[in-house]
Image (spheres, rainbow, N blue to C red):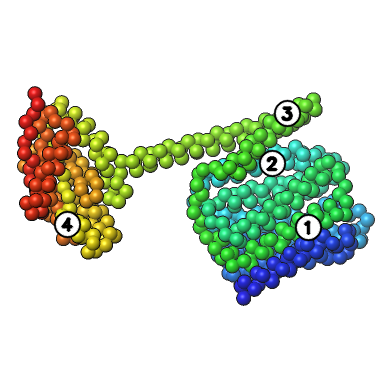
Amino acid sequence: MGNRLVRSYLVVAVSAAVGFLAVPDGSTLQVVWQVTCGWLAAAMIVVGVRRRRPAAPLTWWLIALGVAGNSSGILVERLLLLVQDEPNYPSPADIAYLSLYPAVAAALFLLVRRRAPYRDWSSLVDATTLTTGMGLLAWIFLIKPAASDESIGLLGHVASVAYPVGDIVLLAMTVRLMLSGSGRDISFRLLCAALLSFLTGDAAWAVVNQFGWEPGPAAHRVLADIFLVGYLLFAAAAVHPSVRSLARVAEPRSGRISRPLLAALTVASLIGPALLALEALRHQVTDGLAIAIGCSTLFMLVVTRMSQLIRQLDTQAEKVRELAVTDELTGLPNRRAWNTELPRTIERVRRTGDPLTVAVLDLDRFKQFNDAYGHPVGDRLLKEAAVAWQDQLRTADHLARYGGEEFVVMLPDATVGEAHEIIDRMRLATPLGQSFSAGLALWNGSESSDALVARADAALYDAKHEGRNRILEARPEPAVV
């Protein structure tokens, strides 16, 4: 039933959008067609809420209200034209048209809060940057001219300014939605397409009005059809089965800036300088203050975004450094970290004269254990052993994974006898009924770190040959004077 509903609606929606292009421009049929498409979309959104039961139904009720109100404005405007040759501005039709903006903006706000309840400052900065650039354009070409038109009165000023302001708010919420996490199913894409369709239609009419063009019948139908497509896409998003997961919490998006987003941010950042250059070429800089404020805001947003990226790079670099010296399975320092720490400790005890003992230990019959119980259990043994052994060590001691089932322990300020006691406690604490063999070597005061580990390793192999599950001390190596 669900897929059949979607297929049936898509057939009707595509037929309605394409068929509208053949309807005579300015005819009563055209008005009926537009209003019917809007009301059909609103009704299908209600059906989608009833059938699909999305997680945030209020979002879709608000969108349905906005679509129904906006499309009703077409009918109201037509009825007013039948009664009056030139209806007053603003008229009830404008109230209906404008109802789309607060309703859909509120819906998007609720949806973004559901999808991204965490703090996503990078997305907020990106959305603000894009909106600021477009807002500067809207101020100079739409809002300021409308506010300064003395022929339309106070209510006319309010209505004229409300349209571009509504577009800016809708653009801000659309960008914020598109940047809200990584979950982007079909319903999400359809919803974004519907929003972009409305914004494209408003932008197209703004350009037409700005240049004083008179679109012909064919162009007028195409412009009107953009809004019909927006209506129908809203409904498609609501009836698609994936609408159930649309309001789920999405994974935070990566802080990286994609190439399309980088291009959009670049264009938005250059809008202010481009407007200033345009007015300078005309030898009439009339919006210097607005451009200065816009450029300053964009500059601060760019600096903020750069600081976010720098912090992100620092965090990632720190994680890379940690991963480079940390064993992924056990969380212990790895061989690279050991090869750095042991020479450093040797240099310290060379100055202080304190003893330093090194132990090399190896789990007994680990290969047989893996073969008998499987690699996941073998990994569990390594992880649990690392935790259990760490609990038996002193604060100054240093345990590292040397490779495979082999580990090394550095015991500063510990004689061979003291080290033997500590390592024996570790041996007895080995989990899952397992044991290990170990070799101990006391630094002779002159040998290198490699030589010290080699002596402990030789003692380990002697322990293995003598029957395992024991600790042997390496033969003393005379110091080189």
Q: Residue at x 26, y 62 (%)?
A: 374
Q: Residue at x 50, y 38 (%)?
A: 309
Q: Residue furthest bottom?
A: 1
Disc nearest the viewer among 4 and 2: 4
The amino acid on which the numbered mark 2 sits, given as a three-letter code, is Gly
In this figure, which residue is indicated by the disc labeled 2? 135
Q: Which residue is under mark 1?
A: 225
Question: Looking at the image, do the residues carrying marks 4 and 3 touch, with CB atoms under 8 Å apart?
Answer: no
| Three-letter code, disc 1 | Asp
Name the residue that disc number 4 marks: 365
Element type where label 3 sits in the image: helix
Identify the mark at residue 277; answer none if there is no mark.
3
Amino acid type assigned to the residue bearing label 4 in the image: Arg
**Disc nearer the start of the sequence (4/3):** 3
For the point 15% across and 35% down, the residue is 451
Circle 1: is it few (<14), some (14-19), or many (20+) Cα within 10 Å? many
Q: Position of residue 11 (x, y in %)?
A: 72, 68
440 horizontally vs 2: left or right? left
Secondary structure found at label 2: helix
In whole angstroms, how far apart are the C-alphas of marks 1 and 4?
75 Å
Pinpoint residue 305: horizontal percent, then vertical percent: 54, 38
